């Protein structure tokens, strides 16, 4: 497995070893031992799958402390542009983001640690997206940040996405109450 660090501490892009022949391919999408060797202190408690049409944008979402979630994400069908944003209020990289194309063909994964908002937009006809989460979903802990917040300046590969009502009405990061955002101390 190849691991690429990003400019945001803890956000990793993972390229699993793929074994391919005339019949198709095989790869490990999760191995507790292998990921532990990478230094990821992971215990996953919930897996989620979403299917979305081209142009759908989901995010930016996070769980507020004490229910902060880490996510290991990958695409099972199709292609997405995936984004992680550092929203830890006392982080030197607060408000910075990284993005990467994930697809069923490149089999890349991104690990988004607790303390980061996450979102993706579908660039293929449809996408089947998988999330392994380190914490259970808690509706009262859900926080959304506006996908096109001008201060974040995320370079989405789409101009007019399909959004849920919740995502369309999300506040800019600056407008989210600080006690709803994580800090390095509270993670």
Image (spheres, helix red, strand yellow):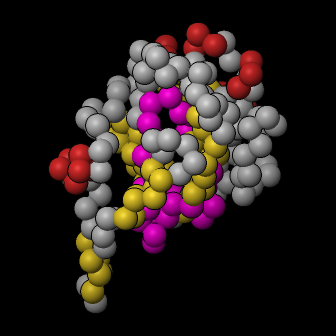
Q: Could you tell me if residue 98 is visible in this image?
A: yes
Residue 148 at what x, y percent from top left? 76, 39
Q: 182 or 27: nearer the eye? A: 182
- Residue at 29%, 50% (x, y): give it: 38
Q: Quadrant of the N terminus?
A: bottom left
Q: Is residue 37 left or right of residue 115?
A: left
Q: Position of residue 99 (x, y in %)?
A: 60, 52
57 shown above or below 66: below
Rendering coords of residue 152 (x, y %): 74, 38
| Residue lying at the far left of the rendered structure | 33
In the current view of this chain or complex, which residue is farthest to the front? 92
In-front residue for pair 183/23: 183
Using the rendered image of the protein, determine whether residue 167 is visible from the camera's viewpoint: no
Queried whether the magenta region covers residue 111, the answer comes back as yes
Taking the spot 44% from the left edge, 62% from the top edge, the residue there is: 108
Which residue occupies the foreground of this view, 59 or 96?
96
Numbered marks: total: 0
- In this picture, which residue range is highlighted in magenta? 101-127
The residue at the point 50 percent across, 41 percent down is: 9
Quarter assignment of residue 133: top left
Quarter holding the C terminus?
top left
Task: Kindly identify the residue that appears in the image at 81 percent across and 37 percent down.
Answer: 150
Q: Is residue 77 magenta?
A: no
> In this rendering, is residue 107 above or below 180?
below
């Amino acid at each position: 497995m190849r691991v690429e660090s990003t400019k945001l501490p803890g956000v990793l892009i993972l390229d699993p070893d793929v074994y391919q022949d005339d019949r198709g391919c095989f790869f490990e999408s999760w191995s507790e031992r292998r990921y532990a060797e990478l230094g990821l202190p992971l215990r996953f408690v919930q897996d989620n799958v979403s299917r979305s049409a081209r142009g759908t944008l989901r995010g930016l979402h996070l769980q507020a402390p004490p229910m902060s979630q880490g996510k290991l994400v990958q695409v099972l069908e199709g292609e997405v542009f995936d984004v992680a944003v550092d929203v830890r209020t006392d982080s030197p990289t607060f408000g910075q983001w990284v993005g990467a194309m994930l697809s069923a063909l490149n089999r890349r994964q991104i690990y988004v640690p607790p303390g980061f908002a996450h979102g993706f937009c579908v660039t293929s006809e449809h996408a089947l997206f998988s999330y392994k989460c380190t914490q259970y979903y808690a509706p009262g802990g859900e926080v959304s940040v506006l996908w096109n917040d001008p201060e974040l300046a995320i370079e989405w590969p789409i101009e007019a996405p399909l959004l849920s009502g919740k995502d369309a009405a999300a506040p800019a990061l600056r407008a989210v109450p600080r006690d709803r955002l994580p800090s390095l101390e509270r993670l």
